Image (cartoon, rainbow, N blue to C red):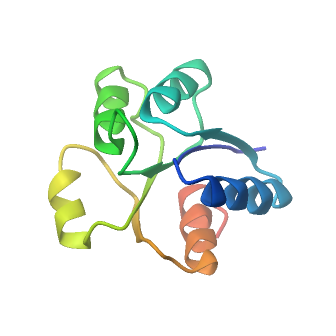
Amino acid sequence: MSSILVVEDQDVLCRMYEAVLGHLRYDVVIANTGEQGLNAARQNRPDLLILDLELPGISGITVAQALQQQGILPGIPVIITTATPREEVLRMTKSIEVLEILIKPFDILVLFDAIGNALGKH
């Protein structure tokens, strides 16, 4: 079973991720802050990281950069979720390898497609 670490601070989205991805038989770990996301990734290297950029405390970009510097991120596909305009996200994420950028609000089918691409289940 593939493990997905979701770093997201909006409760409604966290519940959606848990319900939908759990139903699809993914092992889902939810972190509500950047600090929790860092700790979760360090403790159990996920197969996929779904990362919101706007988080309380440590930003999503800082999380990704820290995981990269610690040698945890390489080899883990990253899907960025954000309400930030795409061009700005592209500038912000130049230092990390990002598989997909999903601009909120996004269609659930787009999320499924991105996860399938990330985990090679397409």
* Residue extending furthest toward the left: 91
Q: Is residue 121 above or below residue 74?
A: below
**In the rendering, at what x and y percent does residue 77 appear?**
47, 49
- The quadrant holding residue 87 is bottom left
15 with respect to 100 (left or right)? right
Closer to us: 85 or 1 = 85
All told, the count of numbered labels is 0
Task: State which quarter of the image contains the C terminus.
Answer: bottom right
Q: Residue at x 79, y 44 (%)?
A: 1
Residue in front for this viewpoint, 40 or 11? 11
Residue 116 sits in quarter: bottom right
In the shown orientation, is residue 61 left or right of residue 28? left
1 vs 86: above or below: above
Q: Position of residue 118 (x, y in %)?
A: 54, 58
Q: Position of residue 11 (x, y in %)?
A: 62, 53
Residue beneath the point at 48% across and 41% down:
76
User: As rendered, which of 35 and 107 lies closer to the eye?
Assistant: 35
At 70% from the left edge and 62% from the top edge, which residue is drawn?
16
**Residue positioned 39% across, 40% down in the render:** 56
Q: Is residue 117 above or below residue 74?
A: below
Residue 64 as seen in the image, left or right of residue 4: left
